[in-house]
Image: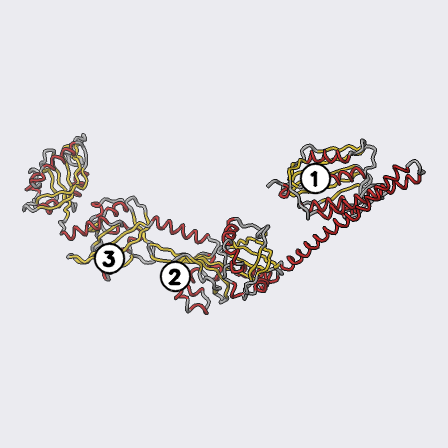
Amino acid sequence: MKINRNPTAKDIFYAAIIESSNDAIVGKDLKGTIISWNKAAENLYGYTAKEIIGLSIDYLIPTDRKYEIQQILTKIKEGKKIDHYETVRLKRDGTEIKVSISVSPIKDDSGKVIGAASIIREIPFVTPEQKKFELAVEAAPNGMLVIDVQGNIRLVNEQIEKMFGYTRSELLGKPIEVLVPARYRENHPQYREDFFKDPKARLMGAGRDLYGLRQDGTEFPVEIGLNPLQTDEGVLVFASVVDITERKRLTQRFELAVEASPTGMIMINRAGEIELLNSQIIKMFGYEKHELMGKKIEILVPERFRAKHPEHRLVFFENPKARLMGAGRDLFGQRKDGTEFPVEIGLNPLITEDGSFVLASVVDITERKKEQEKFRLAIESTPAGILMVNKMGEIELANRQVLKMFKYKKEDLIGQKIEALIPIRFRANHPKYRMAYFMKPQTRAMGTSRDLYGLRSDDTEFPVEIGLNPLKTESGIFVLASIIDITERKNNEQMIKRSNAELERFAYIVSHDLKAPLRGIATISEWIIEEYKQKLDSKGRNYLELLDNRVKKLQALIDGILEYSRIGHVQGEPERINLNKLIEEVKEVLMPPKHIKIKIQQDLPVIYAEKIHIYQIIQNLISNAIIYNDKKQGLIEIGVSEHSKEWKFFVKDNGIGIDEQYKDKVFELFQTLQSKEKYSSTGIGLSLAKKILELYGGKIWFNSIVGQETTFYFTLNKEKVSAG
């Protein structure tokens, strides 16, 4: 405040404002002498301006507080202000009053501090009960206001100050409408009047969005609770104010998330009333939004289920937890047009400040039901037994083949643990195998290299073959097991095993009995050649050489038959085989003619197998390439290419070639496509190679151009020729 020795119109105007103020305003110089005193000061202290001006401010200060004036004046001399200083002052009659004082420096035209101006407001003394109430209000986490019947603010707490940006002194005594946005201000007095006509605890503006107005003019959403407060002065209203900006933001995000959901979402309160829904629900049930909001959820439930639904709803609210609704039962929704459709409903409790709700996700499963029916029909029509088992090992589906195979009724099997179908001696370990499968689900045969058995309801066992397939659904992962009763196959295998053993013995006996006289014939022919070679004419010698040659061919044929019969029945130990070295060994034995060159790829793999088997394959292919080569410069090329699961080898020659029409015949036993007189061959070699390769998961085939070249290809399964 500045003092002008020659008052202007402006000074006179300010003086009039001070004089008419409801607050006591007192001016004093730097010595503490009172120099101005307005009407409100007269009313507060009981002194007239004439009586007090010129006296010391000490007249107004209790003895035990005299020190305050020096502290205040010291700060004023420094040009500082003092805001809302609560203290005690004396009235003319000597009674003490509690006041709140704000002090500002008075400056002259040059800006020099020459005094102080104090604004004083009385703070009513409170009873201990009132003090407790004020402390409780101050400690409340929400904003708290007390308003009288005229709408004036009588009490505020610190939360209100922070929320609205005002100081306490700026609000006390002011009309409540100062905190109400301008667009609502006109109607607010009427709402206030209505409350005082029927004062009772309630939320303000039920169903309407409420907003508060800060000192800086910004608005924010609020929630207001009203409570009547009976006092000696009459009824006051006690209002709790909550800034719900963050809640509104979260609510909007929640509503956006609900709206964005691809499934139908609907929120219901404890009374079963619909409070929120998304466009998927509107589309699914055929209603407009306004037709559903506030309605009971039973409007969407078919009439035949409607009567019991409130009971189910109450049960959920008594024990709210996330779960599927109606587990084990088929659920249906009812559209506006009265038609029904199958649904799947997930329930989620939602606990908020406004109470408990249930957020339900609704999925129209019409298409899924159709697919399930197709799946069921496919399962029922398959000749194999089919079981569907969940992660807990419970049987969820079984076709008629399974029921027939295990001698169960459907109702006795569904829901049972799969271990019920397993013999007791295997039962303990089965859950461990089941859990391991669900950890890494993949299509595979069960119990590879082990004999598997099923257990019928009459406790009889039977051998089975089981294939496992993971089935991923919206409800989780299941395993679909196909089961085949292999009792007949096992019996046939035993018969074949016995037959093979008998055939092996027969082949050995036959070859032994055939080779014995052949050795005799060979020996006699050799004796005759040695003893009578000079006595026989050329024709006789030719006959003996022909006889000797035929005997050797027959011996080779018998050896080939014996080798062929042993494949797969007589097993040796696998060993490490360097194929480059093996081919060199074959070359040394075969001793190819000088005009035939054998070219070998240098990086053939090292494999693990029975050496005799691989030797026979290589020997037969190279031998054929040598035998059936009619070129002056013969060439045999041997190589390999690596693939993810196998090795693919080739043996290529530039010989006579093979007509494509014989592509299958060449692998048949005793088949030769050329004259046995011209080409020495038993017709067993390629059949032998094919049979050996099948043991190693491989196959053999060829490509050929007649008169130019032939390339034989064969594969070996990496898994079957590896050390592991």
Residue type indicated by callout 1? Phe
Q: Position of residue 392 (x, y in %)?
A: 48, 56
The answer to whether residue 99 is above or below residue 210 is above
- Which numbered disc, 1 or 2, marks the residue closer to the eye? 1
Name the element at disc 2: helix
The answer to whether residue 492 is visible is yes
Instruction: Tell me, yes or no, whether the two marked residues, 3 and 1, touch with CB atoms within 8 Å.
Output: no
Which label number is shown at residue 316? 2
Q: Nearer the N terminus, badge 3 or badge 2?
A: 3
Q: Nearer the N terminus, badge 3 or badge 1?
A: 3
At x 19% / y 34%, what residue is drawn? 80
Residue type indicated by callout 2? Phe
Which label number is shown at residue 379? none
Mark-to-mark CA distance, 3 and 1: 94 Å
Image quadrant where residue 367 sits: bottom right
Q: Position of residue 296 (x, y in %)?
A: 40, 64
Q: As rendered, which of 640 and 49 lies closer to the eye?
A: 640
Mark-to-mark CA distance, 3 and 2: 33 Å
Name the element at disc 1: strand
Q: Which residue is mark 1?
A: 649
Please rate how many residues cluster around mark 1, counting C-alpha atoms within 10 Å: few if below 14, some from 14 to 19, many from 20. Answer: some
Q: Position of residue 504 (x, y in %)?
A: 72, 50
Q: Nearer the N terminus, badge 1 or badge 2?
A: 2
Q: Position of residue 660 (x, y in %)?
A: 79, 45
Q: As rendered, which of 373 and 351 lies closer to the eye?
A: 373
Which label number is shown at residue 227? 3
- Which numbered disc, 3 or 1, marks the residue closer to the eye? 1
